[in-house]
Image (cartoon, rainbow, N blue to C red):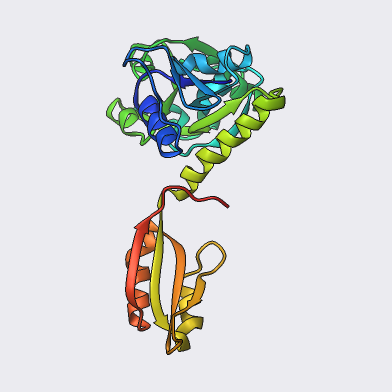
Amino acid sequence: MLRIALPNKGRLAEDTRDLFADAGLEIRARGDRALTASLGGEFEAIFVRSQDIAELVADGVADAGVTGWDLVQESGRPIEARLDLEFGRCRLVLAAREDAGIEAVEQLPARPRVATSFPRCTATWFAARSLPVEVVPVSGAAEVAPHLGIADVVVDLTSTGSTLRVNGLREVATLLDSSARLVARPDVSGPKATALAGLQDALLSVVRARGKRYLMANVPRAALDQVREVLPGLNGPTVLELHGGGPLVAVHAVVGEAALYRTVGALKALGGEGILVTRIERLLP
């Protein structure tokens, strides 16, 4: 049985549940407050705080887990990222007061005081640049620290930077780019390693399918060269003969959702017809 530590609440928990369900691993818990659940087959989930998952995986309580890469880095524990799940994106940034006139790291005062709930990541980043700092650990929002005189600058998480701007802070540097990751102990072996590889493939198939659509159309045989430019797909479009031959052939391709409107328009301009677009649930390489 492969035990997987999953976030127990918040947006990260919701996105994780949706991903596992799309991968065919629906979480079957006895209730909303259940601490464990079956994922079917050889998988079992335990629900814990996101910030505890790296520790639980490293200590062997769980074989794998889903949590933010920022939390893994802050833990300093020897676990590895197996897959970027491409949600929960955020950045760990250094920020100063707008009126402080600090726009680059070089403009920081000597041995600045840095308020943060990520003391390990902060100390490591500054040490790598041979910059002495005084780290001021805080447990809550760090944005207020410079305004209260507790610190000169802050290191905090942001997605869009709006919270920093609302609190009169300016981003100075990015310490870390983060997102939700499937993590595991590096020493998983035997049947558990096989199960973990299967889990990784299942989740990857869903991640690869997101933002993609499957497009089918009948196009003029004479326009195939132009169609191949419009429908590059993963390895170029699949071309199929229609029954009875004739001037048209069928083409199938995976296209990006963002480019779908332009792609359909270009196909129609080339004489395409019978265009059909469907969603993709899973996409294997």
Nearer to me, 169 or 193:
193
**Image quarter for residue 266?**
bottom left
The image quadrant of residue 158 is: top left
Quarter of the picture containing the N terminus is: top right
Image location (x, y in percent) of residue 263: 38, 69
Q: Quick one: 249 or 116, which is closer to the camera?
A: 249
Q: Residue at x 42, y 35 (%)?
A: 19
On the picture, is 39 further left or further right than 257? right
Q: Point out residue 277 in the picture as x, y percentages from the top left corner.
A: 34, 63
Instruction: Note whether 13 is above or below 236 in the view shown.
Output: above
Q: How many marks?
A: 0
* Residue at point 62%, 21% (across, down): 124
Residue in the picture at 45% in, 68% down: 252
Front-lying residue, 71 or 173: 71
As drawn, 139 above or below 282 = above
* Left or right side of 78 for 30: left
The residue at the point 62 percent across, 18 percent down is 76
